[in-house]
Image (cartoon, rainbow, N blue to C red):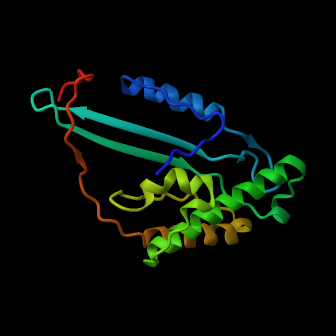
């Protein structure tokens, strides 16, 4: 698979958990948030954090590689209820398109369809190897306690229940590669 180009995306090496935490905080500060009629601090973008881990056994030079992809998805909001206009309306439409594309991928994976429409959106392209195949997929849903948002809560829970239907063959992928440039300990 080819890499997906996303403007403003960067890769940084983190030597420890503190550096990773600082990177996440920096990314969170760059996230677009604005008030709508439904939410005082509505996310106007998704936040994705991809952590690639490489472990090298210094005796056998065997590498174990893993990846964790964490996505904090902006919520879907109905345009009539959120009452956004202009650029915020365009953002809401794009957020809804990406969530619809992700829903289509989840539907295809959970129902065992032969074609999974990963290429329908950059979000699903980035998430492709984290949704199917040998990966473990978890979804957490934040629900509004307000009775006025009951419809959105029900829709979010239906979305999550479809994700629960994804079945993957989770297994360890091992690369047998000499680690001539690595000096990590096992």
Q: Residue at x 54, y 59 (%)?
A: 141
- Return the residue nearer the eye: 147 or 73: 73
Image height check: is 186 above or below 40?
A: above
Does 145 appear above or below 88?
A: below
Q: Say which of 148 and 183 sits in front.
A: 183
Pick whichever, 74 or 54, lies toward us: 54
Q: Is residue 5 left or right of residue 59?
A: right
Task: Kindly indicate the quadrant of the structure image that contains residue 157.
Answer: bottom right
Residue 76 at least partly seen: no
| Front one among 153 and 96 | 96
Residue 168: name its quadrant: bottom left
Callout count: 0
* Side of 143 relative to 76 (left or right): left
Q: Residue furthest left?
A: 59
Residue at (51, 44) in percent of width and height? 3
Horizontal and vertical percent position of residue 5: 60, 42
In the rendered image, residue 138, in percent from the top left (x then y), is placed at: 42, 58
Q: Is residue 91 above or below residue 60?
A: below
In which quadrant will I find the C terminus?
top left
Q: Residue at x 68, y 67 (%)?
A: 152
In the rendered image, residue 98, in percent from the top left (x then y), is placed at: 65, 58
Position of 67 with respect to 49 (left or right) is: left
Q: Is residue 59 above or below residue 74?
A: above
Q: Is any part of residue 68 visible from this angle?
A: yes
């Amino acid at each position: 698979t080819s890499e997906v180009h996303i403007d403003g995306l960067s890769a940084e090496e983190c030597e420890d958990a503190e550096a990773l935490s600082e990177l996440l905080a920096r990314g969170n500060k760059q996230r677009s948030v604005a008030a709508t009629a439904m939410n005082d601090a509505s996310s106007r973008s998704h936040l994705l954090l991809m952590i690639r881990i490489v472990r090298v056994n210094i005796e056998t030079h065997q590498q174990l590689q893993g990846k964790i992809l964490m996505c904090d998805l902006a919520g879907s909001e109905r345009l009539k209820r959120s009452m956004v206009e202009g650029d915020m309306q365009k953002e809401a439409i794009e957020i809804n398109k990406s969530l619809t594309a992700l829903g289509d991928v989840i539907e295809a994976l959970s129902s065992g369809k032969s074609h999974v429409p990963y290429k329908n959106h950059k979000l699903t392209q980035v998430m492709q190897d984290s949704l199917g195949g040998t990966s473990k997929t978890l979804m957490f849903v934040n629900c509004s306690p307000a009775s006025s948002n009951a419809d959105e809560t029900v829709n979010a829970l239906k979305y999550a229940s479809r994700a629960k239907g994804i079945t993957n063959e989770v297994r360890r992928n091992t690369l047998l590669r000499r680690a001539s440039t690595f000096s990590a300990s096992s």
